[in-house]
């Protein structure tokens, strides 16, 4: 489904719904709940309030997209992305951060730890547009990987 189709209807078709999984990581429960509510009709959503919990969920489930806050007590979002990349480099990783973290963001992008970043405060519709676009890209990548595995 494209963002234009989503904008017209405001919904995701049943065949598209929850095909891909999204892991949302933030230490603030209110933000976690808001993001989960925003995306639960678009993805199979997992939430974690720490990097450690995120790693456990990531290891136990097939996650295609990860959306993480940068500033968390145990480990930063960039540190988490480094660990996730070691486990499985395939999922798309997006960082949510404040402007003051720009050097960390640049380093994370340069090291291939994240696909993109979103600044706080974010616009929910822009974030939805980004993730709807990624649904299509990620679904295609996932299909190609499955075809390669079955052919080889």
Image (cartoon, rainbow, N blue to C red):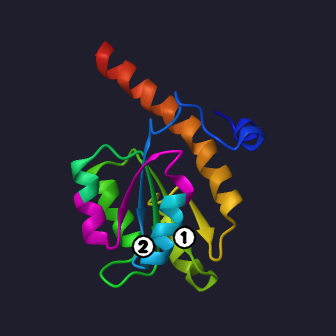
Label 2: how many residues lie within 10 Å, few (<14), some (14-19) or many (20+)? many
Work out whether residue 81 or residue 16 is closer to the camera in this orientation and state it.
16
Image point (58%, 35%), residue name: 136
Q: Cβ–Cβ below 8 Å for labels 2 and 1?
A: yes
Q: Position of residue 9 (x, y in %)?
A: 73, 38
Image point (48%, 60%), residue name: 36
Image point (41%, 47%), residue name: 91
Which numbered disc covers residue 96? 1
Inspect the magenta stretch and tell me whether residue 120 lies in it.
no
What range is drawn magenta here?
A: 38-56
Q: Quadrant of the N terminus?
A: top right
Which SS class for mark 1?
Answer: strand
Left or right of residue 49: residue 118: right
Q: Sequence-wise, which precedes: disc 2 or disc 1? A: 2
Q: Position of residue 65 (x, y in %)?
A: 45, 50
Q: Looking at the image, which residue sits at the far top?
A: 151
Q: Which residue is mark 2?
A: 26
Work out whether residue 33 or residue 103 is closer to the camera in this orientation and state it.
33
Say above or below: 66 vs 29. above
- Distance in Å between CA atoms under marks 2 and 1: 9 Å
């Amino acid at each position: 489904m494209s963002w234009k189709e989503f904008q017209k209807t405001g919904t995701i078709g049943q065949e598209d719904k929850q095909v891909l999984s999204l892991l949302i990581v933030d230490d603030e429960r209110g933000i976690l709940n808001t993001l989960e509510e925003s995306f639960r009709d678009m993805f199979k959503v997992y939430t974690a309030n720490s990097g450690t919990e995120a790693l456990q969920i990531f290891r136990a489930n097939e996650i295609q997209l990860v959306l993480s806050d940068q500033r968390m007590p145990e480990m930063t979002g960039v540190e988490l992305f480094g660990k996730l990349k070691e486990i499985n480099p395939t999922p798309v990783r997006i960082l949510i951060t404040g402007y003051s973290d720009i050097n960390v963001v640049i380093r994370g992008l340069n090291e291939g730890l994240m696909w993109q970043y979103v600044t706080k405060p974010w616009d929910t519709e822009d974030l939805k547009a980004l993730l709807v676009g990624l649904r299509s890209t990620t679904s295609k990548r996932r299909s190609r990987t499955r075809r390669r595995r079955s052919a080889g």
